[in-house]
Image (cartoon, rainbow, N blue to C red):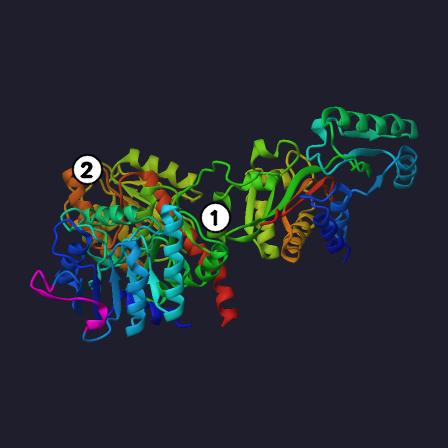
Amino acid sequence: MIHRALIKRAISEGRAKLLEHESIKLLESYGIPVAEAELASEVNEAIALARRIGYPVVLKIVSPDISHKSDVGGVKIGIDSDDGIRSAFNEVISNASERAPGSRIVGVLVQKMAPSGGIEVIIGGLRDRAFGPVIMFGLGGVFVEVLKDVSFRVAPISEEEAYEMLSELKGARILSGYRGMPPVDKSSLVRIILKVAEILDENPEIDSLDLNPVMSYTSGALVVDARIILRSKG
Amino acid sequence: MNYSRELESLFSPSSVAIIGATPIEGKIGRVLVENFTRRYRGKTYLVNPKYSEILGLKCYRSVKELPEPPQLAVIAIPAQFVPQVLVECGEIGVKAAIIISGGFSETGTDEGIKLEREVREVVEKYKIRVIGPNCLGIFDNYSGVDTFFLPEERMKRPPKGGISFISQSGAFASALLDYMAYNNIGIARAISYGNKVDVDDVDLIKFLKEDPVTKVIVLYIEGFKESRGRAFIEVAREVVKKKPIIVYKAGKTSRGGRAVVSHTAALAGDYNIYSAAFRQAGIIEAETFDEITDFAKILLTQPLMKGNRVFIVTDAGGIGVMLTDALVKEGFEVPLTPEDLREELRKVLPRHCITDNPIDLTGDADDERYREVLEIIAFKPYVDALVIGALPHIPGMTMRITDYISSVIGRAKKPVAIINIGSEVALKFKVEFERKGMPVYESPERAARALKALYTYSMYLKKHERGVSSDS
């Protein structure tokens, strides 16, 4: 029940969201595949983690006060050496302190780079006042709110309904193999969709969550970034 | 709890007390007295301490003086007196009440909110089923219960029919009833529930599911209260197995009510969730005002579709092309006429007619030509629905066409939609078609959307048939 402890701690600390590494731990405890990641509090620890995880890696600033990490220069991708870590580690911290002054910095997340060649999708969920847990699937990445190609279902949903969420997107053909690209592994996406429904059902403290992007491959899928928002009191 | 039984007293009571009855013209209490004396066949009691007689009827000082407890109390008095009167009703054993009065939580004032809480407490204590407060209440075309306090000369009452209508907005309910009356669309029961202190959408669709005169349920919804959305779709799933539900959701656009911290919340808004929930439950969503009646007409009168292949028969080539576009856009197949059918049609049609789908009988067609062609097409197994463009402007068209189409469609048991564009003559044909149970549309697009609603409902039922049998 590691995820229960994570949520309880965040609430006791008065936080409205889980930190990056906590979100990842929660998803992993539900068997959702996530790009491997660990939290480092100083640069040598980051190097040791990167060696263990294997290069190339991504560094991400971890702060309870920063929701949009990229906007404050808190993300460095494609780091493939110890030297790379040394410069990037200090850079993300100084960027964050400069562009989000006063933010508490918990550390830096060292995360395995997801393999290229995947299609970015978003899998999300929220708790609606009238309907309870609602699940979303869509074409993801940074343009998600521009494309708005998403489908919704009120939970609980069957496996069949989860597949329908994929097929009813305007861009559904992208997932089925477009212009010589092989089709993505839909079953791995469906498994994550169903797990997100389960997470909302079992953790009433969670208000909403975004898994974005989820890299979808011809075999398997991998969550690269996750945001889990807790319910505000009242 | 048996909701059907409990709510029965709201719709078909054997006796009614009008609390707040008055002889003063222009007052709600006066319209209520007129409504009930005009159509309601049960016993009507009038209550108002100021009068001993209203419009020749005895008036009682209070409900406690009534010779029997009425099955239904209709309350139209100032808000501050409502809780006390409701207590009196509870004490004499009244089990159903419609509270017309406004001045409760909708005002947003402390006083209004307090009064509504008091009403809720009384309702719970005496277990009274209540519609309202702050509502128009019920218009029941079969029992004659009519608490819509708008005078008949302002708001016409529609004819009896199979559509029941539930509205979160009282003003919209009365406007739609008047519109339906003008368009000769039949209504079974209409409900405006206002602040829904007790009975809400969930209870009402449960009741209407078992109601033998209701064939199609239409709802105007702005929003559900806490967790009632989930309850609504759970009940709706069962209701749609028996009769279709059409919902018009108002408040589709967001003004950023939700604190948007995640992409999911930003993309969901409120409306997308409602829309997804409706679809999951097999509810048909009307996206525009026109679609409310467009969909209701076809779902009320036409059999289910077995597939998505539509054949078009018309006397106007242009309408045929427009229909093809509109139908294909909605996802229908407009198949080419198969060779065997083409040959059969050739035998009865003049050379200049077009046998390809859309089948164009051309401007020199008469109703006989329609009859001959439809007798052939309607029975083909690959025809899932017919859309007939029957423009009345050509000289050969007489009212007989309505009988011909009605007869062949009835025997073939296939759904049909009629396109009819024009002025007075077109209207006469429309009235006749609809009287014989065939929905008429004024544009190809509206016909295609309506047929799509029928198709969506048909496919939902087909898909969930498995579910029905495994449940039982």
Q: Amino acid at mark 1?
A: Tyr
- Provide residue B100's location: percent of width, then percent of height: 27, 55
Q: Residue at x 23, y 46 (%)?
A: B179
Q: Earlier in the sequence, mark 2 or mark 1?
A: 1
Report the front residue among A90 and B101: B101
Q: Is residue A123 left or right of residue A28?
A: left
Q: State the image quarter where residue A215 is shown.
A: top right
Q: Is residue A47 visible?
A: yes
Specify the quadrant that holds the N terminus of chain B: bottom left
User: Label 1 near label 2: C-beta < 8 Å?
Assistant: no
Where residue B326 sits: x, y (%)? 38, 38
Q: Which residue is mark 1?
A: B274
For residue B364, which numbered disc appears in the image? Answer: 2
Residue type at the position of mark 2: Asp
Q: Is residue B198 visible?
A: no
Q: Is residue B268 above or below residue A31?
A: above
Chain under callout 1: B
* Gap between marks 2 and 1 measured at Cα: 49 Å
Q: Provide residue B446's location: percent of width, then percent of height.
A: 33, 41
- State the extent of the magenta-drawn residues as a range: B52-66
